[in-house]
Amino acid sequence: MQKVRTVEVNLSLLEEYIKELNKRLGVTIPDLQKELSIISESLSQSKLEINNLLQWNTNMVKEISEVESWKNAVLSQLHELTKEKSILRIEVQKVASDQANLENKELAVLATSLVFVCLAILKIISVLVMTFSTTCNADKVRQTIRGWVMLFVCCSVTIFILVL
């Protein structure tokens, strides 16, 4: 009998313990459900953010590939421009060299023309002085002077053209 009483006491204690446990768990379970719903909502927001990030990543990859293709096109154009620039630089140097040579030749022609003008003037003056001082053949003097006058005129025109 005593065992039955102990069992009954234990059973009543167990019932009280179960009731107490149910009260505690009854309060905890709704809290767990609230936390679970909050976590579920947070998880769906995270999924949405991840999907948005994946979409953004896809768009960025496309934009980066477009920028890289544009960069490659610009680099190829820049390379072509660099080649053209070096070719133009060589051509400009050649033109500058040719111009310097032409200027040197121009100076040589100018100096030669000046020398011939001076010679022609001296010869014309000397022939005229000799004509007045002595009696020489006038036809011979005219032929001599004509050649020197022609040389004087040609050289003067050449100098005039070069100076302009």
Image (cartoon, rainbow, N blue to C red):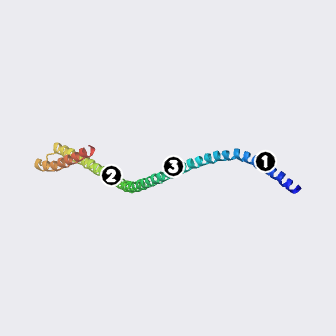
Residue 122: give x, y in percent of width and height.
24, 46
Q: Looking at the image, which is closer to me, 78 or 87?
A: 78
Determine crowd level at label 3: few under 14, some 14-19, many 20+ residues with C-alpha closer than 10 A: few
When the figure is inspected, residue 19 is found, relative to residue 80, above or below; the finding is above
Q: Decide which of 13, 114 is in the foreground and name it.
A: 13
Of labels 3 and 1, earlier in sequence is: 1
How many numbered badges does the structure rendering display?
Answer: 3
Relative side of 153 to 48, left or right: left
- What's the distance in space between the residues labelled 2 and 3, CA to CA? 68 Å
Q: Looking at the image, is mark 1 or mark 2 earlier in the sequence?
A: 1
Location of mark 3 (residue): 52
Quarter of the figure with the N terminus: bottom right
Q: Amino acid at mark 2?
A: Gln
User: Which is in the foreground here, disc 1 or disc 2?
Assistant: 1
Which residue corresponds to the image point at 16% horizontal and 42% vertical from the top-left? 132
Q: Residues within 10 Å of mark 1 (few under 14, many from 20)?
A: few
Amino acid type of the residue that numbered disc 3 sits on in the rendered structure: Asn
**Whole-number angstrom distance, CA of label 1 to CA of label 2:** 118 Å
- Depth check: give the residue in front, 9 or 58: 9
Q: Quadrant of the C terminus?
A: top left
Horizontal relation, residue 41 to residue 23: left or right: left
Mark sitting on residue 16:
1
Q: Secondary structure at mark 3?
A: helix
